Image (spheres, rainbow, N blue to C red):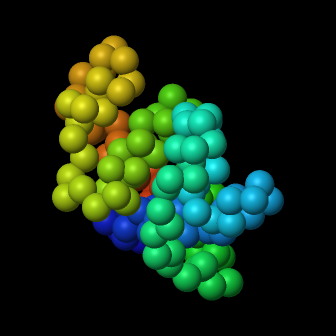
Amino acid sequence: MSWQMVEDRLVEALQLWWRMPDSDGRYGLRGRISSIWRQFVPERALIDAVTEEPRALPPSRGDIGRMQEATDWIVHVPDRDRRMTVLALLYLARGEARVPWMELWDQLGRGRPGPDGLRMRYSRALTIIAAALNRGR
């Protein structure tokens, strides 16, 4: 697999994770909002004011298999780079044309390395995954 193929599959996996059925039904919300919102908006009136958006169909079994396979690839990334790698992939999964490395650097606390170093570590992380996959794990 090439570097670009790895990136595309990881972005696809994140997008599929977002399509997974939510547990809101257990709390009487029936999928109207993501369960994460309850942590930020405790007022029931505000939660009830959220209108329901059209939802994508849940992933198929094949999609879930591909999603889980790509998610497992993250174990090849060094521990110190996993969070940065997933945050960078989140930007791409949301439809950004490229990762805003300066913004990501701010999110990670403006430590060492700088934005260019983060970009290189991200590139190295995907290269490690591609190499592991091409070796046959």
Which residue is painted at 46% across and 69% down in the image? 53
> Which residue lies most toward the right here?
26
Figure disc tally:
0
In the image shown, does 20 or 6 lie closer to the viewer? 20
Image coordinates of residue 25 in percent, x first then y, are 74, 64
Compared across the picture, whether 110 is left or right of 50 comes to left
In the image, is residue 27 above or below residue 117?
Answer: below
Q: Quadrant of residue 33?
A: bottom right
Compared across the picture, whether 103 is left or right of 17 comes to left
Which residue is painted at 68% across and 59% down in the image? 29
Compared across the picture, whether 101 is left or right of 111 comes to left
Q: From where the camera sits, is residue 16 visible?
A: no
Q: Quadrant of residue 88?
A: top left
In the image shown, does 92 or 54 lie closer to the viewer? 54
Which residue is painted at 68% across and 66% down in the image? 30
Image coordinates of residue 43 in percent, x first then y, are 60, 36
Quadrant containing the C terminus is bottom right
Quadrant containing the N terminus is bottom left
Q: From where the camera sits, is residue 10 visible?
A: yes
In the image shown, does 9 or 120 lie closer to the viewer? 9
Image coordinates of residue 107 in percent, x first then y, are 35, 27
Image coordinates of residue 44 in percent, x first then y, are 63, 42
> Which residue lies most toward the front here?
45
